[in-house]
Amino acid sequence: MKSAPDRRQGAVYSASRLVAGAGAIFSPGAVAVADGNVLLAGPKADVLRAAPAGFPRMEFPGAAILPGLVNAHTHLQIPRFTGDSGVPLPVPPSFVDWILRVIAWRLGAAPASFASNFVAASDEALSFGTTTVGEIAGPDLSSYDGSPLRARVFAEGIGFAPHVAAEVLALVGAAIDRLERISAENPLVQAGVSPHTLYTVGERLLRSLAELAAVKGLPACLHLAESLVEMTFLADGGGEIASRLYPAVGKDVSGFRGLGRTIPAYLAEAGLMREGVLLVHTVHLARSEIDALRGGGVRFVLCPRSNAAHGNGAPDVTHFVDAKIPFALGTDSLGSVPDLSLWSEMRAARSLYKGRKKDAALCRELFRAATEHGAAALGLPGGILAPGEPADLSIVDDPGGDGDRFFRGLLEKTGRANVRLTVVDGQPAHGIAA
């Protein structure tokens, strides 16, 4: 087999099967890529006939070519938290304790560690066939200069008191400017805005960040309804967030008495009930609230393994699937989950479904969540392999089976060891030809 060329030279990848998208499979299939984009995708004979004669041809018998996976919610600069012996620490039973652990890490970490964490996490994501991420910006924005992943990097704002809103808004604006300069050199990276959560972003800052995102035409990402302690605080200003979290960081929120309206109404008033808004977790929303938010144009990212690790409950996968509400999947950070495998995330979501859809058909929908719905949620191209789309793909062992049964086998059998090659922007980034 010839060595893979760089993104400019072009190449043809062929395999026993091509999954151009959750609804389009060719056996055998092939994809031709050039200058970072898909040139041709379809039946192997057709692609080989139409591809430029000078393109190197790489054969992967017994494998399936897939769209690259989209991890729509990550924090790649947050590491695995380990003890002195290097053994990973268990996730604290209290969600507030975990938040305090993250704050302590961020304040005490060596500055150089943020970039090294990002590199290690990116490599891990690629090893599972992930090509695109929705990343909450870490402390070191320069880490994204050389990102090997396609990434929507959300500049995060945190500030509950009204008097800090202007200062935080300026910091987020500066971070976006920096990310846009990075994007000019590395087009894989695109900026976004993240008001962190409703319990860490006060109403004045929330409105300001929503307006900033709208004016600049950027998507906005918000952690929402992740834990019961969050819901208690939003209801009446009480609970551990008020009694433990804010006192631990020297802040007084005793004047807050709750949102005073429903979450959908609050977000609508703030300017965050629209297309381009991404809500992460949403474990503790009622189905009527989910429906109202979707009706307003927002999209959702579910992180079932992270929610389970923190004892925060589980997203309502059944409602999302049965109501045909598009959703994406995310791993969250290595501080919460053992790895950055979207395959494990799909399996976790599968275990939560209690509806009547047949299991194999459900697996196809979960694959769609981890590919095209993820890309759409982030406002990025990709998630499918079609002419003009980015040449972001993974090549994995073919589990066999036809139709929906193929997707069931894919979910059941695929892990890191089954990923033969990951290609981002036409460039092999992990595997035998990288």
Image (spheres, rainbow, N blue to C red):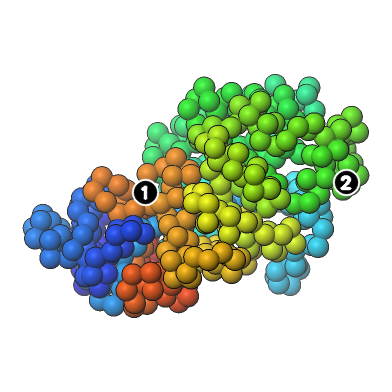
Which quadrant of the rendered structure holds the C terminus? bottom left
Mark identifier at residue 382 = 1
Which quadrant of the rendered structure holds the N terminus? bottom left
- State the residue in front, 127 or 6: 127
Q: Are marks 1 and 2 in contact (CB under 8 Å)?
A: no
Number of callouts in the render? 2
Residue 402, percent across and down?
Answer: 32, 74
Amino acid under disc 1: Gly
Residue 362 visible, this orientation: yes
- Rate crowding at label 1 as few (under 14), some (14 to 19) or many (20 or more) other CA atoms within 10 Å: many
Amino acid under disc 2: Gly
Residue 164, percent across and down?
Answer: 76, 25
- Rate crowding at label 2 as few (under 14), some (14 to 19) or many (20 or more) other CA atoms within 10 Å: some
- State the residue in front, 382 or 416: 382
> Seen in the image, is 385 located left or right of residue 294?
left
Please report the residue visible at 52 percent of the width from the left and 56 percent of the height from the top. 321
Note whether 317 is above or below 2 in the view shown.
Answer: above
Residue 248 visible, this orientation: no
Note whether 158 is above or below 344 in the view shown.
Answer: above
Name the residue carrying label 2: 239
- State the residue in front, 325 or 381: 325
Tell me which numbered mark, 1 or 2, is placed earlier along the sequence.
2
Tag in front: 1 or 2: 2
